[in-house]
Structures are given as structure tokens and as C-alpha cells.
Image: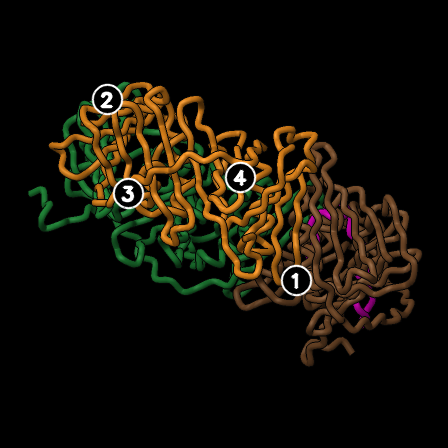
Chain colours: A brown, B orange, C green
């Protein structure tokens, strides 16, 4: 049996909205200590890694380590039924067959909503992510990062991130023109490190999961885009560098 | 001659928006006492019944009982021209040929707008709706009913309503999962009556016609979804039960 | 070299949004005294005439008269990157080849964005617009004019404007009906002049360039729809009258 209760459904709704365009089927690994998810997008360029620790839940019971496979499209439909301030209980019982029940409760109105979603068999490939030291770690407002990615996507389907002592620079170059966004270091004091240049094929667009985003950069290894979730979890995107023959950095 | 003036155009705009996806052509029956409309949707599952009594109008003159046929799509286009706080005069004169004029006036700005819409010949089939006693009458916030119908439509194109002493329960069951919404009786004290189960094929989605909606339920007869309009009228949807062979209640 | 700086990018964004559906390619004529644009729509019914005088810019440098051709679609993409309160620098250097750079700076966040857009060869046909005395000049709130044009477009693809001592009247007549909007003179005291009747094929829809719009009308010559831009420029639409054989005014 697995049973975990979140104080409000909005958090899970935002997480699912943030990843459902990248990953279609999600294997949730539930253990005594956390609910985790690792999945790659279909083009194997982006790896999503989600961790929700026990401390994030109001109640949490996991009798044995279990893998719950869900279509994120269906999970999104279920979560859209919830009001943002509803509580959200996630429940799986072996006897219930292959389905998971989300229960949304709005105490004030004496209303509960049970949404039962069929599970899927998904091969869970929990990849070992090697420890990596990064040349640059940059924190910035999540909204700024999101707007910059959206603006550059107008011009190019890949973007280049360069961090120097002068700041962090995002560049998108395409047929109709070029856009270069520069954040100068006075507001990003962590960036004063060596130069780094890499290209990410696409970037993630979570909306309001957290106020801040942390970018970890190093040449020729995946960039990490991390959104901390309260104090007990994170949503990370590992984005592989794009290797162009003509622009190869070797 | 028919001439009737509403204090603001927003009311008529909301009514037309609420029914125009269900009914395309509307025969308005105008008499000394009220402006009425009865029409079935094309699949003959839903009957719309609208009554606007004289008391709802600022001025009202109807020389003789008359039937005014209008395309609701055209009527919607006309009403979208009105600002919500404009007054709305509806006028038909035998001499004007086959058209109706809506006049919207915004006194402050010294602006008037006359929209003349061509009439249609529509067979008016004013059905006698038999008196029916219902096992359950349930009042609830219109917004809750609307959200519940929208949520369940994600999972199923039919929904099941069950009322017991424990509350009123809406169920939608489909391929991707099942959603069950329960309102417990503490907030719906009228529901403490015998069990009722029926299925409605689709439900109506008026937005802000009224704060409350009244559901009248009885096995094997159409459910009535009623929105009171101020104190002088109503918009009712009669929705036929869906008879499945496998789930037949007989 | 051409270099001009606007205190905020919102102004240029609004101008481009207002004209980009009418005109695809824009030749900006830059001189010592102003940045101008004249272009006709593809059907040669509407002439757009834009003038931004030096006084509108924070800084302005134009070494020699020059014509900068830009796709308005690309210019719109560039300007959408700007936040409304960003400053906007427009820069062209002969040495940079055929491109223009827009620099948006948000001083608070120490962020700058350079968007470089390729230029186009556009035949600039700066038409001499003859002086014309108009029978009627009518000023009205831009929002009212915009709503009236939008409402009438529901019914007809041409509209008729008639101004008399009784007011200014906009009429759209189509298959589904007719809409007549009347503004009475008490709020438009300038309109008390002789009768004028003409038809304009389409009208412009700038949103919030200015609070007021000025219409200049005379039989059988183009109507002028003018939006003043601050105190140092204007956006004008010259709209040719539509000559119908059956409704010819001769």
C-alpha cells in the first residue's frame, strides 16, 4: 500500500504541467523516504529528475518500495479537477488492481473528488547520474530564465549560454536574426568564474514551481536546470549539449 | 407590434450564450404576460425552456401573441455589440418586414446602436411538459455544478447522478479513469431523501445567469436543471436519461 | 550611422502591432528631423503614414538620410522580447552589413537584450499626399472608434460613415443584418457641420497608441484616421472610399 497526502494539490499540478510536454509516461518510484521520478524525453536529449521527500507530505505511508507508472496526460487531467487549495491524497492498493486514486478534498464545502486513473507498465530506467563539478553555478529569478528561453525560441531552436566574469549571456541565432541577452554580474554575484560555452537543445518551462532557478554549467556535459521545491525536494532537468560539426568546441 | 426593454443587455447576452451551442434556431413566443422559448437540441436529448415574465422588463408592450424566430448565432452577434450596462430594447413591427431590431443605448456617452437582424421561419413546437413529482430536489452553487460537469466531461460523455442521505454524487466513467464527486449533506440539507440514479447525456453550462442551480431528479424521467432569473423567470434544461442496455435500471 | 533611443519600448511595440496586419514590409525613412514610414497595403486601399519626430526620442543621431527596410513580422518578434518599461535603442551602422540592432535595457535588473534583425530591400515610394480640406473633422475616444469598427465588422466588410448636425453615424450592412451606431453631437460638439457620406473598406485597429482618434471626412476622398503620438508624431491611416456601382453617390 502507498498513501501520501499533500497539503494542496497545486504543487503536484504545477510539477505535472512542467514536465508533461517533455515526458509522456512517468514511472514514479515510491520508497520509505521519497517519491521520485526519472525519465528521458523521446529524443534522449533531456532527463527529468524529480524528488519529493517525505517531509513534503502531510502524511506518508509506503509499505514497500514500489514503482507506479502513469501517463502524465491522464495525470494532468486528473489534477485539473482539483482546486488549488484542495488537499491531495495519492493512494495505491495492491488489491485495487492496476489503478491509482487521487482524492481532492475541499473541507469548507464538504466536497470530495476521487479520480481513479489506470496505471501503465513503464520500464523504469533509474540512471545513475555521476557526480559532476561545474565551472559555473548561477542562480536567477525563474521568471527571468523562463522569459529569456521563450524570447530566444522565437529566433532559434537551440540556445547558447556563456558565463564570464562579465555576466551570463544567452544567445539564440536564426534565419531572421539574432538575440543576445546579458545579465551583468552585479545582480548575479555567483557568476564570476571561468568562461563556459555550451548549447542546450531546448529548455524547460516550469512556471511557478519556485521563485528561483539554479543553472549549473560545464563544457561538454549536460547543463542542469534545477527548481528547488520547498525545502524537501527538487525538479531537475539535465539537458545534453548540442554538438554541431561546424561549431564543435573540441 | 412587440416592444420590450431590459435595463441591461448583459442578461439577454448570458441567456443566449448559455443556449446557443445546444439550440441553433429559437422561436420566441411573445405574449401579454411573458417572452418564452422552447426548443430541443438536434439530437432530441435536451429541451430548453426559457421564460422571461413581464416583471423583468422596464417597459413591455405586446399587442398580440406572436412568434419571433431568430438564429441564435445571429442574435449572439447582435448582443456582443452591446456593452453590459447598455439598456436593450427589443422591437418588432409588422410593417418592418421580417426583421427584429435590438437597440442598445449607453446614456452617458450619448451613443445608441441599432442592430437589425433578419427573422427566420421556425416551426414552434410548444411541448406540454407534464407535471412531475421528483424524488430529489437539490440546490447547489451554480459554479460548483458547472465545474463538476466540466471535470467529469474530461473522463466521460455521460454522467451519473446519485442522491442519497449521504449526499449527492456525480460519477463519470471512461477509458482513462473514473471521477466521483461527492457533496455531503451538511451543506445540502435538502438531499436527505430516497436514492435516485439516472444518467444525463450532457449537461448545460450557463455561466453566471444565477448564483444557484436547482436539480430535480427522479428515476427514468428527465432531470431538470433550473437557473432562476431574478424573480421573474427561469432558464430550464430538461435532459433525457441515457438508457444503456447493460446498465438498464428496470 | 543611425542611432535613436526611446524611453520605453512599449510605444514602438504598439505602433508595429497596429500596422503589421496591413503592411508586411516597412521602409523607415530616417532623417535629421524624424523617423518616418509610408506604405500601402497590398490591395492599395489603405496608406499608412507614420511620423516620429526627434523630440520623441531620448537621444537621436542620424548622420545622413537613410532608408531602413524591415519586415514588420520580424520587427514584431524583436519587440515582443522587450518588457514594456525597457528602454529601446535602434541602431544601424553601415559597417555592420544589412542589419539593424534593437537594444532593450532594463536598468533595475542589470539586463540588456540585443536583437539583431536582417534588413530588406524595399522600394520606398514616398507619396506626396495632397493638402485636402475636409468637410468634417471628428474627434472621439479611440476605444469607442475601435469597438464600433469591430462590431460593424461582424455584419459587413465595409462601413459607411455619415456626419450631420445630428451626430456621426457608422453603418454596416450585411447578409445577417444591419448595425447602425450613432454618436449624438452633445458629446461631439465638433461634428455640427454639413452632411458627408463615404464608405471605407476597412478601418485600422490600433489599441492604445493614444486615447483619442481624429477622423477627417470628405466625400469621395480618402478618410483620414489619425492617432496622435504624444506631442511629436502621429500614425495616420488614409482609407480609400469604396465605390459601389449601385450605391454610387454621384
Task: Look at 39% across and 43% down and name the residue there.
Answer: B47
Mark 1 closeness class: few <14, some 14–19, many ≥20 residues within 10 Å: few
* Quarter of the image where one finds residue B234: top left
Q: Chain of mark 4?
A: B
Residue hosting label 4: B217
Residue hosting label 1: A21
Q: Chain of mark 3?
A: B
Place of residue B75 in the rendered image (x, y in percent of width and height, measured from the top left)? 31, 40
For discs 1 and 3, the disc positioned in front in the rendered view: 3
Asked if one can make out residue C136 in the rendered structure from this viewpoint, the answer is no
Q: Nearer the viewer, residue B21 or A158?
A: B21
Residue hosting label 3: B125
Q: CA distance from mark 1 to mark 4?
A: 42 Å
SS at badge 3 = loop
Q: Chain of mark 2?
A: B
Mark 3 closeness class: few <14, some 14–19, many ≥20 residues within 10 Å: few
Say whether disc 2 or disc 4 marks the residue closer to the N-terminus.
2
Magenta span: chief secondary structure: loop
Q: Magenta stretch: give its range.
A: A205-224
Question: In the image, are marks 1 and 3 on the same chain?
Answer: no
SS at badge 2 = strand
Q: Nearer the viewer, residue C150 or C227?
A: C150
Amino acid at each position: 500500500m502507498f498513501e501520501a497526502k499533500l497539503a494542496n494539490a497545486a504543487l503536484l499540478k504545477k510539477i505535472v504541467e512542467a514536465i508533461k510536454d517533455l515526458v509522456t509516461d512517468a514511472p514514479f518510484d515510491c520508497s520509505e523516504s521519497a517519491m521520485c521520478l526519472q525519465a528521458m524525453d523521446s529524443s534522449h536529449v533531456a532527463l527529468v529528475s524529480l524528488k519529493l521527500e517525505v517531509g513534503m507530505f502531510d502524511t506518508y505511508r509506503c509499505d514497500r518500495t514500489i514503482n507506479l507508472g502513469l501517463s502524465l496526460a491522464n495525470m494532468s487531467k486528473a489534477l485539473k479537477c482539483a482546486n488549488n487549495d484542495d488537499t491531495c491524497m495519492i493512494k495505491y492498493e495492491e488489491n485495487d488492481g492496476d489503478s491509482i486514486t487521487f482524492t481532492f478534498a475541499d473541507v469548507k464545502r464538504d466536497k470530495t473528488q476521487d479520480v481513479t486513473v489506470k496505471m501503465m507498465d513503464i520500464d523504469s530506467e533509474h540512471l545513475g547520474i555521476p557526480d559532476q563539478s561545474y565551472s559555473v553555478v548561477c542562480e536567477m529569478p525563474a521568471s527571468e530564465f523562463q522569459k529569456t528561453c521563450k524570447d530566444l525560441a522565437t529566433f532559434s531552436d537551440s540556445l547558447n549560454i556563456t558565463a564570464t566574469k562579465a555576466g551570463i549571456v544567452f544567445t539564440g541565432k536564426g534565419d531572421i536574426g539574432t538575440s543576445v541577452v546579458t545579465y551583468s554580474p552585479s545582480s548575479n554575484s555567483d557568476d564570476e568564474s571561468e568562461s563556459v560555452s555550451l548549447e542546450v537543445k531546448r529548455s524547460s518551462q516550469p512556471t511557478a514551481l519556485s521563485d528561483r532557478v539554479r543553472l549549473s554549467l560545464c563544457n561538454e556535459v549536460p547543463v542542469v536546470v534545477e527548481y528547488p521545491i520547498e525545502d524537501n525536494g527538487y525538479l531537475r532537468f539535465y539537458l545534453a549539449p548540442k554538438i554541431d560539426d561546424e561549431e564543435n568546441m573540441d
